[in-house]
Image (cartoon, rainbow, N blue to C red):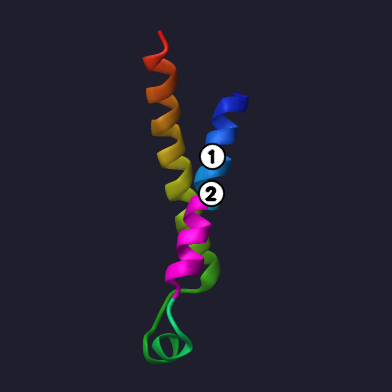
Amino acid sequence: MKTFLRVIWKNMKLFLSLYLFFRPTDEAVASAARPPIWSRVAAYATLAIMVSAVLYIKITWGQK
């Protein structure tokens, strides 16, 4: 379980850093209708958890 949480934590940091690197400028935000930031953060968190689950399953099944 600790390994799974560690993988989730690393993927959350990765997706957060990717979001912060590729976030749009203020001009792009002003010209486009975008969903609220919390829904985007929730989407990134969900994606990170799903990727973590797949990686964890591959890692644990690969060790058998």
Q: How many marks?
A: 2
Q: Amino acid at mark 1?
A: Ile
Q: Looking at this view, is 26 or 50 the one in front? A: 26
Q: Identify which residue is drawn at 55% across, 51% down.
A: 13
Q: Identify which residue is drawn at 59% across, 33% down.
A: 5
Are dots 1 and 2 in contact, CB under 8 Å?
Answer: yes
Q: Residue furthest top?
A: 64
Crowd rating for badge 2 (residues with CA inside 10 Å; few <14, some 14–19, many 20+): many
Q: Amino acid at mark 2?
A: Met
Q: Is residue 25 above or below residue 8?
A: below
User: Residue 12 location in percent, x, y?
Assistant: 53, 49
Residue beneath disc 1: 8
Magenta span includes 59: no
Magenta span includes 17: yes
Q: Where does the magenta region start and end? A: 14-23
Query: Any mark on residue 12, and which?
Result: 2
Q: CA distance from mark 1 to mark 2?
A: 6 Å
Question: How would you classify the magenta stretch by its main secondary structure?
Answer: helix
The quarter of the rendered structure image containing the C terminus is top left
User: Residue 42 location in percent, x, y?
Assistant: 51, 57
Crowd rating for badge 1 (residues with CA inside 10 Å; few <14, some 14–19, many 20+): many
User: Residue 59 location in percent, x, y?
Assistant: 42, 22
The quarter of the rendered structure image containing the N terminus is top right
Query: Could you tell me which secondary element the residue under label 2 belongs to?
Result: helix
